[in-house]
Structures are given as C-alpha cells and as structure tokens.
Amino acid sequence: MPYREDTLPLQNYDRQNAGAIAAKLSALTQRELRQVREYELARENRQVVLDRIAELTSDEPWEGYDEQDGATIAEVIASADPDTVRFVVDYEREHRSRAQVIRAAARAQ
C-alpha cells in the first residue's frame, strides 16, 4: 500500500534532508519504519535513510512491544527471564531509549 506524506510518522518528511530523517528514525516503531521505508523507496530512494532503517529493523522483544507504554513493559520485565531482559535493554538502547524501561530492566537483572 503506497503511503502519503501526511500519513507518515515524521512531519514534513519531504522537506527534510536524508541526514535529518535518519537521525529521527530510532524513535519509530517497527511498523513505522516499514512505512517510511516503503515511502522512501517509492520516492527519493536515499541510501542514508534506507541504511539507517535497515540498521533499526529487527524483531521486537515480543509481539506488540513497540505499541506498549513504558509502564506496561516495566511490569512484564519484572518477571521476565534474563535473556528477555537483556533483549529489552539492547532493543531500547537502539530504539526509543525510554528511561523507565531501562531502569526497570536494570532492577530485573
């Protein structure tokens, strides 16, 4: 499905240079990264943007993770196994860096 600029998670996308877009991508969910990738491929096809999306594209710690708020994730990791907690920490540091989640993970380790 082709996306329009006004449906993208980054405002004024078409007015931003590739570096500015790439710098903002880590805050996006996996679904949003797919949207931006499809839009970029259909339009400018800028390698800087596509490379950064490729770096950030990965599995979520669990299904629906990106859509959950920090408090919900903190509750889940309080009783999670050590591998899941490490995955959450790594994922958060690469993506949204939510302090609440990282603090909860540190307590769970």
Image (spheres, rainbow, N blue to C red):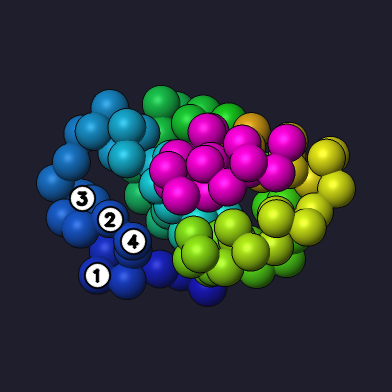
Amino acid found under the numbered disc labelled 2: Leu
Q: Secondary structure at mark 2?
A: loop
Q: Main secondary structure of the magenta part?
A: helix
- Residue 63: which quarter of the image? bottom right
Q: Observer-nearest residue: 32 or 39?
A: 32
C-alpha gap between disc 4 and disc 1:
8 Å
Residue projecting furthest to the front: 107
Tags 4 and 2 touching, CB below 8 Å = yes
Tags 1 and 2 touching, CB below 8 Å = no
Q: Residue at x 53, y 73 (%)?
A: 1
C-alpha gap between disc 4 and disc 3:
12 Å
Tags 3 and 2 touching, CB below 8 Å = no
The boundaries of the magenta stretch are: 93-109
Instruction: For marks 1 and 2, give the one nearer the viewer.
Output: 2
Residue 6, label in figure: 1
Q: Residue at x 32, y 40 (%)?
A: 24
Q: Residue at x 24, y 33 (%)?
A: 20
Please name the residue that numbered disc 4 is placed on: 9
Please name the residue that numbered disc 3 is placed on: 14
Mark 1 neighbour class, 10 Å CA radius: few under 14, some 14 to 19, many 20 or more: few
Residue 91, given in percent of the width and then of the height, sits at 62, 40
Residue 37, given in percent of the width and then of the height, sits at 49, 49
Q: Secondary structure at mark 3?
A: helix
Q: Observer-nearest residue: 62 or 34?
A: 62
Please name the residue that numbered disc 2 is placed on: 10
Amino acid found under the numbered disc labelled 4: Pro
